[in-house]
């Protein structure tokens, strides 16, 4: 029997329901797991996404898209196929897609993490026969510390910079990671400024009920007037640009799962690297995949071959890799709408 979800030229496709999940080429009907640029492309005729992600999709793809928002767990019939969205814990509005037809269930994870995140509900395993999982950080070297530990380091770095009169500039991916950092950082330390690329998402987050600290648009003169007391949040695309040089004396840092690898920090040319990811680490991936009980697993993103081999050898799961066009948003030097906004 054919799989309920298969790979086609334009993306992941459900033939019985005639719809696509995170397609990379324009299609009639697209179900979108979340608003990151490698999953949410422009040009589809109709979109379905989790309700909290609707505004984010409009901000990234244009206010004129035809998009329907669904609550987590809400049953939706698409040409006789039962579709529902379930928490992926990756960012605001992120969802796994559950597809059911004639007793067969497929789950498509999108990007996910299993650790808690104050900006979205925690990942919920979806029991299924076929699970299509991301594998961005699927190597045993990737193991995340509790976020309380990481934020203690970030807060200490900010305080330390204040003591020597240097503005703290923290680079994070503009959508998702930035708002998570803002929700978890100790904002009593000092004033927080944000680059325009991040600022544009704030209203959507607060409208969805996510707590965010007071933010000021990052005017260089206003930052310099704080004499090093301020934290500036900026996207990776702002690194090394003339904009940065206007801020005066700074200490720079990058927050990403890739900071596990020392060379990546040097490559970015920042003073500090904080290991903070919105993807599952090695243990998280194995925990999430085995919790689905799936007999067949297909892997996308990152180290998918390593994880497929491990699942075959250690768990006896029929696991293989899928060649997709999904990437890692940390490395995807931001979608063009953000560039335009900055
Ligand atoms: Zn993502
Ligand atoms: Zn992705």
Image (tube, helix red, strand yellow):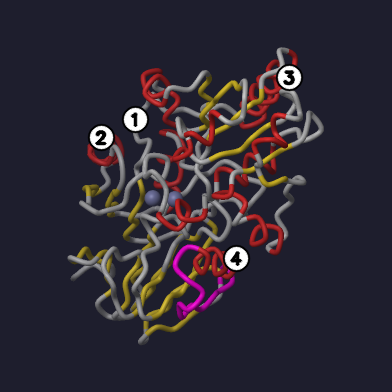
Q: Can you tell which of label 3 and label 4 is closer to the viewer?
A: 3
Q: What separation in Å lies between label 1 and label 3 (alpha carbons)? A: 37 Å
Q: Which of marks 3 and 4 is nearer the N terminus?
A: 4
Q: Can you tell which of label 1 and label 4 is closer to the viewer?
A: 4
Which mark is on residue 52?
4
Left or right: 46 as drawn, with respect to 213: left
Q: Where is residue 312 in the image (x, y as percent from the top left)?
A: 24, 40
Q: What separation in Å lies between label 1 and label 4 (alpha carbons)? A: 31 Å
For the point 51% across and 74% down, the residue is 63
**Tally of numbered discs:** 4
Tell me which segment is drawn in magenta: 60-73
Element under disc 4: helix
Q: In which quarter of the image is residue 189?
A: top right
Residue with the mark numbered 1 = 139
Element under disc 3: helix
Q: Which of marks 1 and 3 is nearer the N terminus?
A: 1
Residue with the mark numbered 2 = 306
Q: Can you tell which of label 4 and label 2 is closer to the viewer?
A: 4
When the figure is inspected, residue 242 is found, relative to residue 270, above or below; the finding is: below
Q: Position of residue 34 (x, y in %)?
A: 47, 60
Question: Which class describes the residues within 10 Å of circle 2: few (<14), some (14-19), or many (20+)?
Answer: some
């Amino acid at each position: 029997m054919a799989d309920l979800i298969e790979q086609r030229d334009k993306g992941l496709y459900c033939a019985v329901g005639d719809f696509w999940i995170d397609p990379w080429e324009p299609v009639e009907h697209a179900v979108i797991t979340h608003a990151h640029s490698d999953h949410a492309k422009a040009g589809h005729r109709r979109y379905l996404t989790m309700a909290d992600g609707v505004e984010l999709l409009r901000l990234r793809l244009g206010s004129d898209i035809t998009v329907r928002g669904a609550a987590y767990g809400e049953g939706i019939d698409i040409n006789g196929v039962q579709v529902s969205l379930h928490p992926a814990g990756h960012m605001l509005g992120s969802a796994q897609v559950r597809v059911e037809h004639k007793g067969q269930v497929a789950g498509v994870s999108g990007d996910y993490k299993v650790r808690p995140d104050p900006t979205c509900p925690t990942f919920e395993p979806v029991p299924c026969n076929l699970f299509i999982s991301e594998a961005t950080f699927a190597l045993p070297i990737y193991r995340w510390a509790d976020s309380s530990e990481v934020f203690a380091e970030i807060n200490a770095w900010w305080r330390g910079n204040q003591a020597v009169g240097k503005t703290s500039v923290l680079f994070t991916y503009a959508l998702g990671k930035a708002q998570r950092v803002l929700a978890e950082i100790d904002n009593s330390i000092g004033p927080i400024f944000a680059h325009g690329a991040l600022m544009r998402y704030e209203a959507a987050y607060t409208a969805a009920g996510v707590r965010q600290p007071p933010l000021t648009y990052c005017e260089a003169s206003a930052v310099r007037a704080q004499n090093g007391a301020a934290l500036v949040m900026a996207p990776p695309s702002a690194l090394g640009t003339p904009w940065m040089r206007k801020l005066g004396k700074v200490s720079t840092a990058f927050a990403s799962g890739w900071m596990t690898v020392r060379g990546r920090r040097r490559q970015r040319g920042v003073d500090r690297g904080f290991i903070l990811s919105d993807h599952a680490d090695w243990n998280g991936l194995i925990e999430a995949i085995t919790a689905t009980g799936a007999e067949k697993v297909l892997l996308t993103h990152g180290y998918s071959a390593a994880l497929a081999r491990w699942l075959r050898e250690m768990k006896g799961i029929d696991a293989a890799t899928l060649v997709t066009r999904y990437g890692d948003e940390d490395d995807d030097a931001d979608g063009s709408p953000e560039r335009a906004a900055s």
